[in-house]
Amino acid sequence: MPFYAHSLAWLLGLEGVALLRAQAGDLGDAAFVEQRIAEIRKMVIDPDPELRAGAVVGQASTTEGYAQWAEQYDGEGNPLIAVEEPLVRRILGTLAAGRALDAACGTGRHAAFLAGLGHEVVGVDSSAEMLVRAEAKVPEGEFRQGDLCRMPVPSNSFDVVVCALALTHLPALGPPLVELARAARPGGHVVLSDIHPLSLYLGGVPRVAGPDGGVRAMPASRFLASDYISAIHQAGLRIAACHEPRWGESPGGHGGPLAQRWCSEAAAVAYQDTPALIVWHLRKP
């Protein structure tokens, strides 16, 4: 659904989160609180022209969004990948080489890692543009275009199934979890990663350019840990481990250029030690 976004509202939200954390005793002293109030007063009473405009944000499909992102998706400007990749690779690195499926493989970053570990790799993604990148990155792999809920792969055929940063784009967890479980062999491993719902509220809803020059948001469902647990059990999988890696320091600062210009300290506090992702290591009995 379209929603209304406003630069000033976004900055005030970051200031508010920082103040809530201070009031809860997490971070900040009296000087910190007074600084937040002074910044809020300045932005509200005499807003800079940059902060006066709002706009309706429309909806973009994942196919449209990832077509735009394909060339720069793996770049250094994606802080979520910087948090996600080391943990997921650490889990994958403990698993014996076999036949591996990278579901919603994107540019093939995990497929390439799995191939380097000696796995026979198959990747599936709905984006033709992403698959071109994956095929170039992992020439020894096999890549197919398909839907995450109806993958063109045989049942009970993979020792390892990984699905990274994709489930939030779907309206429900049940269908994709059943499909991932179907693809895994008995005794196989399923590794999932996705953005944490708290990160979505801190600005993590992905946006892309619209055809009219405006901005559109890609689908981003807010799945809680309990939602995953229910879907995992209903799919017949078992939980081996769950991780919620937190935001640490960010080289460019948190919240993007706008937050860094107007409330960098508040943004740092809003993000600090907040869960960035949720990562699951599952087993198929």
Image: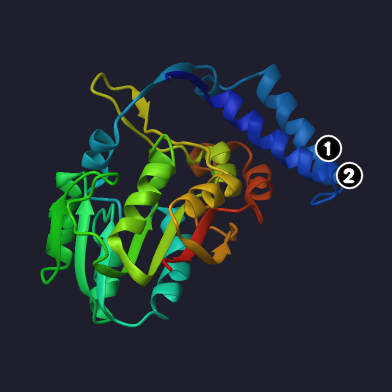
In this rendering, position of residue 159 left or right of residue 249:
left
Residue 164: percent from left, percent from top: 38, 56
Colouring method of the image: rainbow
Q: Which mark is residue 227?
A: none
Badge 1 amino acid: Glu
In the displayed structure image, the side of residue 216 where residue 133 appears, left or right: left
Q: Quadrant of residue 52?
A: top right
Total labels drawn: 2
Q: Split into 4 quadrants, where in the image is the C terminus?
A: bottom left
Disc 1 element: helix
- x 20%, y 44%: residue: 127
Q: Secondary structure at mark 2?
A: helix
Reading the image, the residue beneath label 1 is 34
**Residue at 79% in and 51% down:** 27
Q: Residue at x 36, y 47 (%)?
A: 176
The reply to whether residue 75 is in sight is no
Quadrant position of residue 273: bottom right
Q: Please give the residue where the numbered disc 2 appears in the rendered image.
A: 30
Mark 2 in CB contact with mark 1 (< 8 angstroms): yes
Q: Pick the quarter of the image with the N terminus.
A: top left
